[in-house]
Amino acid sequence: MGPKSNSGFYLSKKAAVFFAFLVLALLVILTVFVGLYAKLRAERTQEVTPATREPPSVSSSMQPGAERLGPWNHTRLPSNLQPIYYQLELWPKQVHPGKDHLYFLIGQANVTVMCLEETEVFLIHSRNLNYSGLSLTAGAHSPQLDPRPVPNIQEIWLEVSHDYLVIELDGKLVPGQQYILQSNYSGQLDEKLQGLFIIPDPEKEHQKPIIASLLEPTFARSVFPCFDEPAMKATFDIRLVNRPEFVAISNMPAIDKTAISNGEAEYALNITGPILAYFEKYYDVNYPLPKIDIVALPLYGPEAMENWGLLLFRKSSLLLDPKKESFKKLAITAVIAHELAHQARLYNWFGNLATIRWWNNLWLNEGFASYFENLEFSSEDHVKKWKHRYPIHLKYFVFQSEENIFSHSLSMKKEDIETFDEIMEMFSDTTYIKGASVIDMISHFMTEELFSKGLTSYLKAFSYSNAEADDVWNHLQMAIDSQDVIKLPTSIKSIMDTWTMQEGLPIITVNTTSGTVKQDYFGKSKENRNSNYSWFIPIFWMKNGSMQPLIWFDGESKTYPEIKRTTDEEWILLNINVSTLCRIVYDDSNWQQLILQLNKDPTVIPSSNRMQLICDAFDLEKIGNINIRTALSTTTYLAKEQDNDVWYAAFHYFSRLEKVIRTTYTFGLYKKYIFSRIVPFYYHQMKLMNEDFNNIHNSSVEKTIFLKTLNKLYLLDLKDLMDRATDLYSQLMSNPANNTIPSYARRHIYCEAIKAGSEKEWNFAWSLYQNSSQDDEVLLFAMGCSREPWILSRYLHYTLDELIVSEKHSYTVYQSVAENPIGWALAWNFLRANWNSINTNSTYYFELMTLLDTVSEGLLTDFGLQEFELFLNSTTDEEEWAHTVQQLIIDSRDLLNWNKKIHTEVHNWLSEHIPAN
């Protein structure tokens, strides 16, 4: 790795030959052209200036062939040719130099292949490329195994349905011989942030066009003809043709470097080296390239892309204003660690040198990267101390995603993942988060030491080659077999096939009176419940606070004497630290003993398991495994709880309950109950901050959880918070030029002050919004907190004039008013009355769906949902919104049915548990 630059992103010392061993579909020739426009300088290379936006017309004999059967009818490439070496020249050319930002692509590709099986068809991927010349010659290093001459090209045509350039020959290619396909071509720069594309600079005054690439999973074929499958690995020699005022960056050492001003990249630069060093030490391998560049793009499809030696990020995901609070540090750390874990994969760290054979095992790439992205630093001196900690709450997100209709098994059959849409469906929460969670489980039952040993062995064995899941299991098994301390009930492969080859997750039902245990299915398909699905499940557990030896549950229902309670006061707790992805259903008596322990001394139970008990109880109630009274009882001790992860879960389930009771007569009881549980946690957080919101960076308070606390207190009218907010807001009104309210808390502080104030406070916020763009979103949300219906009504009507409130900001106004208990009905009536004046096109799809979801929460009656459904069916475009609208209606019906099921019990339980005063 080259030395780190003090002023920019680039870590290399000098330019070098662009030659890299790359994964074709993930990164081949990922280039970024950063245009630095000042004046147009004299051209150093001869340019061709077409008169129109279209690429220059090309003469070609290519015509689509008549419909017939052949290898071009299959989604996967045949195995008769293997790419060895690409020699590429790429030239993005401006249509009207100096006048606009319209570009097309001129390219030249020499692709050297090895023939593995006789064939009369040369099949290669190509999408939207126009060819002006094609030829096939013998490779320079091809052994003379056969005296036959190179066959002539007989016919050339495009099979558009599978993105193939089909080259039919008048003879057969010979196994063992090398051939070179030479081509000249042109193409368009993509407008969808795919392939090779141009990005407009949002800072219009600078007019700096950026040309970047995104080739994963199947976009490389739109940039150059290639064998666009992950197993088709090759080496590359790349030539980039660009005008002198451009900077060109590719996978190997950079040609030039530029500085980022204002220190916004400093944090990302400072942590990149330490994270890379962590991975080098963990895997016992060194980073092989002479540099690694990090580039922030104004616009980019994914959050980031892990090109070897050249990481591309969305600007918003990477840069941090050092003058403001470091709210984004953890997020930036995670995204950089994720992409560097891919770099790790590139040189023995999962994926590009040890590459998946096909997309059906994508989880081996993304699951490992997601697992290793979760680094945390012990202090601001993050350069010295790193440790890995997999977030517990992500495991419970897996259970939510498993109920999604689009969930799938981690490993899929190859024949089920062939089309572009099928490949894209693999880039899912299942692949990323479930994959990472399963990997975390392995590290627990193997121990971190053996796990690391097995991975290092696997990565070294499969460097520069392709691998499948079984290859990982074999090397982990070798680590297990090398010692005699850790014993498994069967092979690693047999264990892990139950977790990767079938969808869903296990529910363990345990009777602690008898010691019997059985498994059930948890997932999207109700038909699979009580099916033959089974897992090998490693369970760490404790009895009355004392850790017990690891138990393995297999698919059979059987009795385990060791987990039988011997007295009524004993309790059993399974799945310590939530090391395994499973739900636990206890018998009623064990639930009650666990709840008694929580109220007596919650610290006896690990914090991760306190979170587990709440999550399991509420989610298992939803599918009918336990009753709502037991679920609610897991929250009774929360006045004593100070752990952030536990509160993360509690806030989630409180919010879910609020959805169904917010407009019922039970809501008053609910507010009193959660007031008595949440307020002590708020005071604890304020104490840690020395009673000052600005001290959060010098305390152990986790900002995300503190903001969730403030958000929940919005319902409760806590005097302490309202007084603090009113005082800070009054100071701001007196001196608008000196805003001492920390930016992370402004939305909540402004909201509390406007809620407690009058028109005067609201008008001040409106004046700030009109005169400054710094806190636009914050102010728009806060102004929806007013308790004056007429102010909220006026606020909504401001959105009808785009000169007052822009289309982009209108949805923020609607959402803020709809979330206000006083404003919900106003927002609903306004939307119905003015629907035709509201921009509902796809640009604001997410905002519209979020708004409709919020509105639906106030309509959870049979009549209300009938009215809601009638409105949606009569106003939304049938084709564009049909699926989403239908899902919204289904979700609302589910909430209504849940409310009917639990409401009486919730009301009675709350009546029994609210404070006497």
Image (tube, rainbow, N blue to C red):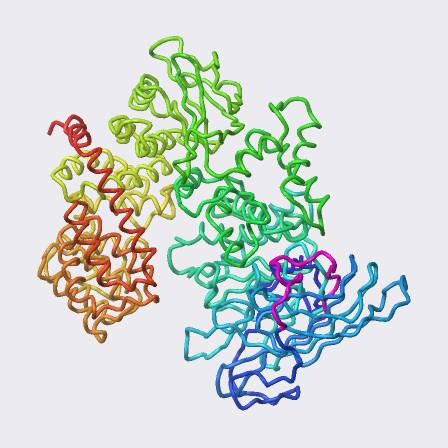
Q: In the rendered structure, does residue 68 fall within the stretch colored magenta?
A: yes
Q: Please say if 907 is above or below 560.
A: below
- Relative to the observer, which residue lies in front, 267 or 678? 678
- Relative to the observer, which residue lies in front, 745 or 97? 97
Is residue 274 visible in the rendered image? The answer is: no
Q: Is residue 571 left or right of residue 255?
A: left
Is residue 283 visible in the rendered image? The answer is: yes
Instruction: Quarter of the image for the N terminus: give it.
Output: bottom right
Q: Residue at x 19, y 32 (%)?
A: 906
| Residue 804 location, quadrant | bottom left
Q: In the rendered picture of this protein, how many numbered marks are placed on residues?
A: 0
Q: Residue at x 68, y 41 (%)?
A: 458
Q: Position of residue 907 (x, y in %)?
A: 16, 32
Q: In the rendered structure, does residue 691 fall within the stretch colored magenta?
A: no
- Relative to the observer, which residue lies in front, 832 or 197? 832
Instruction: Quarter of the image for the C terminus: give it.
Output: top left
Q: Position of residue 717 (x, y in %)?
A: 16, 44
Q: Which residues are magenta?
A: 65-87
Q: Is residue 115 left or right of residue 240?
A: right
Which residue sits furthest top?
566
| Residue 676 location, quadrant | top left
Q: Position of residue 31 (x, y in %)?
A: 60, 68
